[in-house]
Amino acid sequence: MKGEPAAPHNNVATVTAEDNEGTDASDSDDADVDYNDVAPKIDVTKTANPTSVPETGADVTFTITVENIGTEPVTLIGAVDTVFGPIDVMEFDKQYLIVGDTATYSFTEWMEGEPATPHENVVTVTAEDNEGTDASDSDDADVD
């Protein structure tokens, strides 16, 4: 049996019996089943292509993939990169993910710097289920 936490299942059984003189007797009882909220789960993967550029610089394409690894659908509600800032979730190829589904977003940035200082940034994506329960996950991408 499955359901939503805000709507518990109520089941009522009524039994009626008749004795040998035709007199009816009946009684009812109920049982309630409450549903516990299951937190959503997502898995975020961030990659950089290429992962190494000359110190004078080159374009690097970052790709963010979000997979719904939970047990119910989720909607992407936020994404932020520690270097490049907020990412509009409307930029992902989809925002609503059924179980097992993925969403992807790619962007390209010019990267240059000193060889002794690799570039690292972390993206954190947040999603929520239909009860408003959040899930978030992070991943990083390095460029030498």
Image: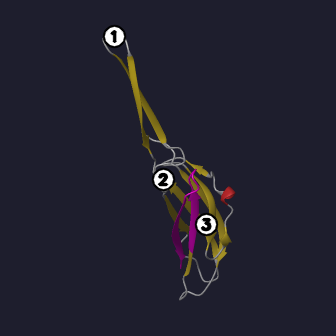
In front: 122, or 117? 122
**Dot in front, 3 or 2:** 2
**Residue range highlighted in magenta:** 122-144
* C-alpha span from label 3 to label 2: 38 Å
Residue flagged by tag 2: what amino acid is it? Asp
| Callout 2 crowding tier (Cα within 10 Å): few <14, some 14–19, many ≥20 | few
Residue 99, labelled with which disc?
Answer: none
Q: Which residue is mark 3?
A: 61
The numbered mark, 1 or 2, whose residue comes first in the sequence reads: 1
Residue 21, labelled with which disc?
Answer: 1
Quarter-wise, where is residue 52 in the image?
bottom right
The numbered mark, 1 or 3, whose residue comes first in the sequence reads: 1
Q: What percent of the width, then of the height, locates residue 67?
A: 51, 55
In front: 16, or 39? 16
**Dot in front, 1 or 3:** 1
* C-alpha span from label 1 to label 2: 51 Å
Is residue 142 one of those drawn in magenta?
yes
The numbered mark, 3 or 2, whose residue comes first in the sequence reads: 2
**Principal secondary structure, stretch drawn in magenta:** strand
Q: On the picture, is 142 further left or further right than 1? A: right
Q: Is residue 13 shown above or below 109?
A: above
Residue at 64 percent of width and 82 percent of height: 56
Q: Which residue is mark 2?
A: 37
Q: What percent of the width, then of the height, locates residue 120?
A: 55, 78
Residue flagged by tag 1: what amino acid is it? Glu
